[in-house]
Image: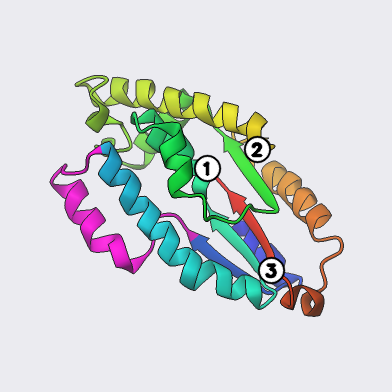
Amino acid sequence: MLLERWLRARGYPVHFTEWNSSRLVRRAMRRGKKKNLLTPTTFSLLHAVDFADRLTYQILPPLKAGMIVLADRYVFTAFARDVARGVHPEWVRGVYSFAPRPDLTIYFRVPIEVSLERLLTGRAKLKYYEAGMDVGLSTEPVQSFRLFQSQVLAIYDRLTEEFALKTIDATDEIPAQQKIVRRMVQEILRDYDYERVQANHGFPIQTR
């Protein structure tokens, strides 16, 4: 992760964690996806278990040690994807009510057609769940992707207003994006003092 390397190069203690990476649910998630067994609610609960496990073992301990935690996606990912799958918004938020609020959340906004082009440039076809095939919007994967991800994007846009997410145009060149990200992070870390923060709760920073 570019931001992680940039912070480490400047001497900051950093821990990185990413969505859906807990070993606790990895096997169940893989099996469910392979056989298309996951209902929207089951999908939501598995991601919540993943998050709870990582929060307990990968997020809170580094924060309590005064480190900066970078999260590649956070609870807002569930707020958008799960609701787009038809799970009730209040239920999803209740499930994640234990999650600490990040000091900074950056939303890299990408138009649907750009996302589609990037994905299909790297591989031959879309994955079942990323295309929203489980929701039944269309039997054609590309069209299903457009419909499902458009709903996800619309929810993210509403979350941006509600939770003051910082939006970055992810169609810009990467150096330009990183310049903006670093400026935002520098502002958050302006008063960062490792020893003082050690006794507090650290600095959680999340990116979509």
Helix, strand or loop status at disc 2: helix
The reply, left or right, for residue 80 in relation to residue 1 is: left
The reply, left or right, for residue 21 in relation to residue 160 is: left
Residue carrying label 1:
76
The residue lying at 47 percent from left, 38 percent from top is 79
The reply, left or right, for residue 145 in relation to residue 2 is: left
Badge 1, how many Cα within 10 Å: few under 14, some, many 20+? Answer: many
What type is the residue that disc 2 sits on? Phe
Per the rendered image, the range of residues in magenta is 18-39
The residue lying at 55 percent from left, 67 percent from top is 59
Q: Nearer the viewer, mark 3 or mark 1?
A: 3
Helix, strand or loop status at disc 3: loop
Give the CA distance from mark 2 to mark 1.
9 Å
Helix, strand or loop status at disc 1: helix
The residue lying at 59 percent from left, 49 percent from top is 207
Sequence-wise first label, 3 or 1: 1
Q: Is residue 36 magenta?
A: yes
Badge 3, how many Cα within 10 Å: few under 14, some, many 20+? Answer: some
Badge 2, how many Cα within 10 Å: few under 14, some, many 20+? Answer: few
In the picture, the disc for residue 163 is 2
Q: Is residue 201 magenta?
A: no
Quadrant position of residue 152: top left
Quadrant position of residue 25: bottom left
As drawn, the residue found furthest toward the left would be 35
Q: Are marks 2 and 1 in contact (CB under 8 Å)?
A: yes
In the picture, the disc for residue 201 is 3
In the rendered view, tell whether residue 145 sits above or below residue 5.
above
- Whether residue 71 is visible, yes or no, is yes
What type is the residue that disc 3 sits on? His
Estimate the x, y position of residue 138 in percent, counting from the top left: 24, 19
What type is the residue that disc 1 sits on? Phe
